[in-house]
Image: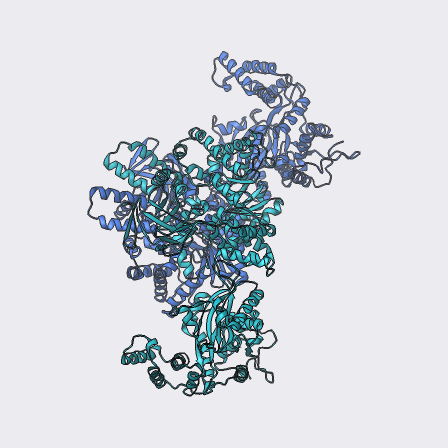
Chain colours: A blue, B cyan
Amino acid sequence: MAGGAVGPVRQDSAESVRISCLGGACIGRLGGEVSGEQPPKWVYDFAEGSRDMRELLGGKGANVAEMTRVLGSDRVPPGFTITTEACVAFMREGHEPDGLEEQVAAAMRRLEETAGKRFGDETDPLLVSVRSGARESMPGMLDTILNLGLNDAAVAGLARATENDRFAWDSYRRLVQMFGNVAHGVPGARFESAIKEVKGRAGVDSDAELDVDALKTLVDRFQGLYEFPQDPREQLQHAIRAVFRSWTGERAVHYRRINRIPDDWGTAVNVQLMVFGNKGESSATGVAFSRDEVTGVPEPSGDFLVNAQGEDVVSGVRTPRDISELAAVMPEAHEQLMDILRSLERHYKDMQDTEFTIEEGHLWMLQTRNAKRPAQAAVRFAVDAVEEGLLSREEALRTLDAGALEALLHPHFDHGDSYRVLARGVAASPGAAAGAIVFTVEDAVRQARAGEAVILVRPFTEADDVAGFHVSKGILTSEGGKASHAALVARGMGVPAVTGAQVAIDLEHDELRIDGEVFHAGDMIGVDGSEGAVVDPGAQLLEPELDERFETVLEWADRIRRLGVRANADTPEDAAKARELGAEGIGLCRTEHMFMAEGRQPKMRAMIMARDSDGRRAALRELLPLQEEDFTGIFEAMRGLPVTIRLLDPPLHEFLPNLPELRAQVERARLEQGDDMEELEQLLARVEEIHEGNPMLGTRGCRLGILYPEIYEMQVHAIMRAAKSLDEPPLAEIMIPLVAYEHEIEMLRELVVRVSSDYGMEPGRDFTVGTMIELPRACFVANRIARHADFFSFGTNDLTQTAIGLSRDDAESKFMPAYIEGKIVDRSPFETIDAPGVGWLVRLAAWVGREAHPSLKLGICGEHGGDPESIAFFDMAGLDYVSCSPPRVPIARVAAAQSALAR
Amino acid sequence: MAGGAVGPVRQDSAESVRISCLGGACIGRLGGEVSGEQPPKWVYDFAEGSRDMRELLGGKGANVAEMTRVLGSDRVPPGFTITTEACVAFMREGHEPDGLEEQVAAAMRRLEETAGKRFGDETDPLLVSVRSGARESMPGMLDTILNLGLNDAAVAGLARATENDRFAWDSYRRLVQMFGNVAHGVPGARFESAIKEVKGRAGVDSDAELDVDALKTLVDRFQGLYEFPQDPREQLQHAIRAVFRSWTGERAVHYRRINRIPDDWGTAVNVQLMVFGNKGESSATGVAFSRDEVTGVPEPSGDFLVNAQGEDVVSGVRTPRDISELAAVMPEAHEQLMDILRSLERHYKDMQDTEFTIEEGHLWMLQTRNAKRPAQAAVRFAVDAVEEGLLSREEALRTLDAGALEALLHPHFDHGDSYRVLARGVAASPGAAAGAIVFTVEDAVRQARAGEAVILVRPFTEADDVAGFHVSKGILTSEGGKASHAALVARGMGVPAVTGAQVAIDLEHDELRIDGEVFHAGDMIGVDGSEGAVVDPGAQLLEPELDERFETVLEWADRIRRLGVRANADTPEDAAKARELGAEGIGLCRTEHMFMAEGRQPKMRAMIMARDSDGRRAALRELLPLQEEDFTGIFEAMRGLPVTIRLLDPPLHEFLPNLPELRAQVERARLEQGDDMEELEQLLARVEEIHEGNPMLGTRGCRLGILYPEIYEMQVHAIMRAAKSLDEPPLAEIMIPLVAYEHEIEMLRELVVRVSSDYGMEPGRDFTVGTMIELPRACFVANRIARHADFFSFGTNDLTQTAIGLSRDDAESKFMPAYIEGKIVDRSPFETIDAPGVGWLVRLAAWVGREAHPSLKLGICGEHGGDPESIAFFDMAGLDYVSCSPPRVPIARVAAAQSALAR
């Protein structure tokens, strides 16, 4: 006999097959010829399995087994699973492994006994389905055959039993067709052409219109295409073999390549009794949720149809009835179903989404899974479940999808009739808004001041455009992804945005074109940033309802989490909002946005145009009181809490017009002999002078502070003045960006300490100085940098850009979509931290930084600070806090708690 | 008594003082009050020290001690050193530590005895110098006092002894002035104003014209400014104290801050007998080299003057005589000097550069150091020294400055009268050239074809300009540093270049302006890339002489080194040259330069302008035969050796016109209603489409290969065709650039293998596939990448850019100069590998890559491959080879040998 897998824990064997095969030579546990031993157990009845046996029984087999364990074998149509190991052995040996046929035959006998029917019976035949089920779902890739057990005689029995000739013959027609295609390799087109011909002769258009005689003709014609085995046992053997073979079919192999599923996992085969909800008025079929799937109200919900098949419920041909009505129609089955829903909830400790069939009064459960539900229902379930004693708080928190909670914090469109999608794009910043189209920041500011709701529409946005974000209700761009400038700034400010939308934006003619429809400035448009859609502005806007239940969940989370949660905020309004949402401080206050504000740009430009330090100082003197005012507002909003202020970071060119535009403008002015020529030329000269090929890697961050110390000095003056002016100042944490070398932070720390000593402010007591860790080199020398830093804040956006060598904007708009489609990456590394690369750098820096400076405070302020999976990573890496955009603060609180629970 | 430092190994104590003080609280070995113990040894006679005692005796003290050891105390003016520890104790206690005064007094007694003179003697006084000498040289920062021991009585003795009244009184005048300034803090201005007044009264302009009486008056006036101690012992005590105090002077502290020298090192104080070469006709002074310092010919060289002081030899007031004439004048001293030069060479195992004084027939050696010498002399010395048995080959190799050898491989200007520097710039690519100025690539190509020698003059260069490099004799830019595009390409091609020159280049008027002088296109100019100078084109050009001795040295190096040496070469000419210089293969053949070649750009542009894969394929079909031709040429040149070919790397926009220029051009064309409008607009649209904010981090490298597989396919076809066409093909190593993810290399390796199978070529047998490691992430996941790679080649240029987050061009032209000046970095990280950051990444990738794939071949092809210090690093990191530009191949061979010797 063949097949030497031994040992009681079978899923382990499957695993070792996989591992031993990875090396190339697939020998080992299945390879030996061990005579005299029992063949392995290839077949498991559903009652023998459980959800832990996924590797051996496949996903589907494990799921149906678990349900059988919970509900008993009289609630789940009985059947059995042929293991993935049998498939592996079949592939290796080219035929059924020893013992398999016998074990299948025995299982079939048990099934007949349980069902009280016989395979091939001419009055009420036992029918089974044969379905593949791999360890991971491979939708549509492997084969399935239904209604196995029918033959020329049994079909009549089925017709009698269901009192439905058409159903019986259509089932048989489907079996012969499916079987021929799947098990005998008859091309589908040959069946299709036969159907077409018969339909033509009958003068009907759809399959559903074919009558019993036509179906009989078809069965006949199909049996002419190949030899359909009338023996149900032979059908079963062929069907099992067909499923095994489908594992190595071209389609499946290709799918596995793309999805990186190992070839040697194999698939399991599930053989299950078929049940029918269309056997008359005591039969029914439906779907049921253990609670309302939209609101979470603790009442089961769902639909059903009497005397129907599952597809009738879904297809909408007949209008299903509400599940509550089942109580009147079939009171016993209804009560059983209600019991079952409660049992399943208790067992799975989550809200359930089930499918059921009632066959002649008997309730069968076909499927159960944790119910997908909108955020509001999820929160309601969590709170109710704790009140009901169903779950502990910890368990309840685990049921939440932290990322989805954001929906609770943004207005959203009613997805009713008024909701019409005009174009798709990237869901860049959640929430919804409608307003008048503006194509320039100037228009945005002017019209918003006049009280108009505006949507800023640009091909893409730049730092210059930030003033427009403040006043716009929504942002729409035709370029860029989730991490484009527009998306980042919009998320940071909580402004809904759709980026990279399939629209044409023609700034020359001030036109937005969508599928031939042309919108002009002033026309209304809707932006659904949660869905990534440009919508008809008539859609109804709903305000978010922040209910008590959500507050309750957040309070639990706060008691459980280790990780602190702060917000990234640049304005007093954002700071106040963040505090309201539970932020424990500001982890990133970007000072450059302050310089972008209206009325400040000319001063900033004067500073940059200055030829020397004195000129810069003069311009900075004018900016100082404004900057002081900014800080005072933020400090007031965050009184008593820490506020991390990043000194100026972006390259100076971001404050000047863009070079190609300016070049063109100068060219026009030259030809038209404009009179502002000299000023323009000067501006052009300066823009060209500070122009850099790769500004991301250029003169920015602390490099600016070292070249132009007067800028950082002004900022420190402003911070100290603001702090001095308040009774209850926050703990100012002054952050030096883009540090790569120890001496950068050393020099700039000295600058900060020197300036602040003018105000009697002392480091450690009145403020701290730290650095943003956002370059790979900084991670390697973090021990040296830590000597001069009170804290590190990981700037994971830039760290991702440099570690992987991809610029956020360029990657997301150019090649990242192709990378995700081609499965080179699972997700954009700007969305979830790239653990093997960027994540290692974070861990390294945390480790060597703390080694040199044990009390070093560690935080993270990149976009990843609001992503639940990344938050779990940072928690494990031992960081002290995460900082994210204000609307994501509640998400971070929940994600941090979930991470603490997972440890 | 104070000062508890104990233990015999005194330099260790100094070290521990330093370390214990770093923590802030400077307690420890010097802190205790240990009664009854002997005070530490604060004073060392020169005869007691050695060059290993730098930390205790300072650099100067250790050097004079070593020379005393070698030559005996009757050849080096005797004296003693007060240790750095005494200085540290003085600083701590605020006064001389216990025992110091006694030890100094004892040392003075020994000195008097040795010299046979007495301090303050009225006939022939003992004079000493008191000089500071820290562990590291701090030129001009610490104090020195000469002629100590003179007073109103002794000056007469000195005058008699030297038979030179003026000399004696001038010496005394200098002492009183220096002492007043240094030891008593009398402002220098007060002495100067006295001198000015006396000169005015005497009616002379310079100090040298002051006669004895005037000098006497001055001494008198000076003594009126403060109380000059007539007791020489008191002078000495004050002088020592002054040197100690100068360590904490503002100047020195500032210098240490900038140079990062710890404050607690302290300085040593050297007290040395003064000797005089101007005591008549039996006295002399001079400099002597153990061999000719220009040619290396094994004959001592040098100059001397009879009855003169050192400064007379240097100042050029009197014409010094050749050292060989000393044999006639003072045969005994000459013979002694020749002996000493030989001894010193033997001792230091290197050519020596010495200073000497003969005082009344007695030869004193004042200084010796390894002689700086040009590359040719260095090579000659190495070979001669081995022949003479002075050095082993290994020792001889160690005497070479590998980096300087490049000078032997380039033409150079004769630095005679014809050599006139017009402007300074960066020595970007060594060698010299003169030719006619051209401002455009088109002109360069046209005029070069007409046989003219041209110098390409541009503010900066871009990939577009590469065709111009091929045909130009030299390159001159006004922007960019040693690692600018111009510098890199020029070095790669061995074309002399000066970048970032202090010139104005006005492309609008085709003018090169230097200091007001205007050069037009066609005017002649000279470029000295070794010196970094724009020179008068009349300078005489000398061809390099590659002598046998250099070949000998290179052969030794080849026998010793472990590391392979390859060259970066993109053309058959470069490849041939590299092979001639000893390259063992090509480590980097950049295929994009081929597309820049004349006549190919339109085809390349057509490829980029194509809207779909078919259009690109059509354009690529036209490029295929050209690319095949390129490879055939290179392969022929490298027959039998490995050639690493990098598939297309740069972003496509580099093959199109630059955006701001094009924007301006379109603007002009629009206003002028040009008729090529449509084409221009299309071009602009495409340029805007592929424009990226940070192309370095954008769609380039393997990202191109994944988005446009047809490009890489064409390149692989060309490689395979070229390889098939040759009898003795090289080992083609196909390199995928910019890999960050395992699946990138996996997919592209599949592409390469698939295409090459069309030619019956098999990976492993006929070619290999590897990757460039140039992103931090790739280093972290190098084990996964190594599964699909036969080799790694570290692209340390890009790795430096991403690891430190600085773009080469932007950094070198914008902030790197300030960083080097401010000592934030010692050197540009693009010149020498940044060991703590970039270097770690290299070691990490080498380690985990080899762990996953033990036979993985490892090389490096960044600019660092030609830098000796970096080569040593790569050798230690276990790489298999370095690859550098052809002219640096000999340097790399020597550096690799030196590294092997250092292990």
**Residue B91 x %, y %:** 48, 78
Residue A577 visible in the displayed image? no
| Residue nearest the viewer, comparing B343 with A424 | B343
Residue A2, by quadrant, is top right
| Residue nearest the viewer, comparing A61 with A545 | A61
Position of A760 with respect to B294 (left or right) is: left
**Residue A852 x %, y %:** 53, 62
**Residue A443 x %, y %:** 27, 45
Q: How many marks?
A: 0
Q: Quadrant of the C terminus of chain B?
A: bottom right
Query: Does B475 sit above or below residue A243?
Result: below
Query: Does A308 sit above or below residue A589?
Result: above
Q: Residue furthest front?
A: B328
Which residue is at a point 50% across and 85% down the rendered structure image?
A: B118
Residue B551 visible in the displayed image? yes
**Residue A81 x %, y %:** 66, 33
Query: Does A340 sit above or below residue B373?
Result: above
Q: Residue furthest top?
A: A201
| Residue nearest the viewer, comparing B221 with A699 | B221
